[in-house]
Image (cartoon, rainbow, N blue to C red):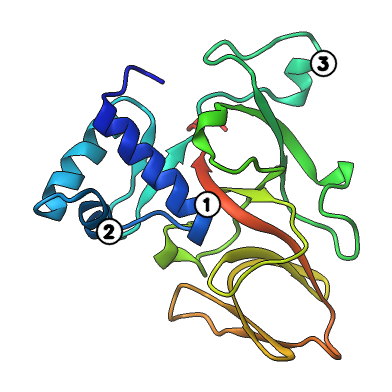
Amino acid sequence: MRDLTARQQQILELIQSHINNTGFPPTRAEIATTLGFKSPNAAEEHLKALARKGVIELASGSSRGIRLKLLSAAHEDDSSRGIMPSAIQVALTLPLIGRVAAGSPILAQQHIEASYALDPNLFSDKPDYLLKVRGMSMRDAGILDGDLLAVKRVQEARTGQIVVARVGSDVTVKRLRKRGHTIELLPENPDFEPIIIDTRSDEFALEGLAVGLVRSGKGL
C-alpha cells in the first residue's frame, strides 16, 4: 500500500485495530505507549508521513483526529455506464447511506446515495455500508459532521463500542453503555445529552457497529 515502511504499516494496522475494537482512532499518546516510542511527538512524525502518502488524514483540534482516507469512489450513474474507478483495484464496494426515512430499513434502495470502492486494507473487519454522519455529537471521538462512518451489521455490541442505533424514528451514532434493562447512548461532546432507553418499553434497534471512519474527497 503506497510503499509504506514497516513502521508506517505497523502504525496503520494499529489505527485500524483500535478503530475496530473501540470505534474511534487512538491518540498520539496511545500510539506512543503501544509501540514503545519515547514521546507522542515520535508518533506524530509517523502520522504526518502517513498523511503525506495519502493513507490517512489528520484533523486539527482533536486528540483523536486521525481519519482513514477514502481512496476512490464510483457513483452509481458512472458504474451503470461501465466506468470503473482507476485509483485502486476494486475489492470492496460499499453503499453510502444518507438520510434514513422513519420506519424503513437502513439499506433500503431509496437511502443509497452512491457506491464507493475502498481499499480493503483500510479495515480489519469488513464493513457492510457507509453512513453519512449528521451533526457534531461525536466530535471528541474524531467523528465530524459529513464524515463517512464504516458500519458492520451486527445484532450485539459491547459496552464502550460506537454503534449505529435506531431509537423510535431516528437513526443515531453514539457510544453504547448497557445497565441491566437500560441502554445509554452516549455522545462524545459535552453540548449533547445522553439518550436513555428502557429496553422493556422503548423502541430500540441496533443497526450496526462502527468499524472505521473515512472522509470523501472535495469533489463529493
Q: Which residue is mark 3?
A: 80
* Inter-mark Cα distance, 1 to 3: 32 Å
Circle 1 residue: 20
Q: Dot 3 lies on which element?
A: loop
- Residue 114: x, y in percent? 72, 33
At numbered mark 1, what does the secondary structure look like: helix, strand or loop? helix
Give the Cα distance between marks 1 and 2: 15 Å
Seen in the picture, residue 178 relative to 46 is either above or below; the reply is below
- Precedes in sequence: disc 3 or disc 2: 2
Residue 147 makes an appearance in the image: no
Which residue, as the protein is rendered here, is positioned at the far left?
38
Dot in front, 1 or 3: 1
> Of 177 and 140, which appears nearest the observer?
177
Relative to residue 45, is residue 91 depicted above or below? Answer: above
- Kind of residue at disc 3: Ser
Q: Which residue is mark 2?
A: 30
Q: Classify mark 2: residues with Cα within 10 Å, few (<14), some (14-19) or many (20+).
A: some
Q: Against 194, is 127 above or below?
A: above
Which quadrant is the N terminus positioned in?
A: top left
Answer with mark 1 or mark 3, whichever residue precedes in sequence.
Answer: 1
Q: Position of residue 9 (x, y in %)?
A: 34, 31
Residue 81 horizontal/vertical position (percent): 80, 10
Q: Residue at point 60% right, 43% down? A: 125
The amino acid type, in three-letter code, at marker 2 is: Glu
Of the numbered discs 1 and 2, the one sitting upstream in the chain is 1
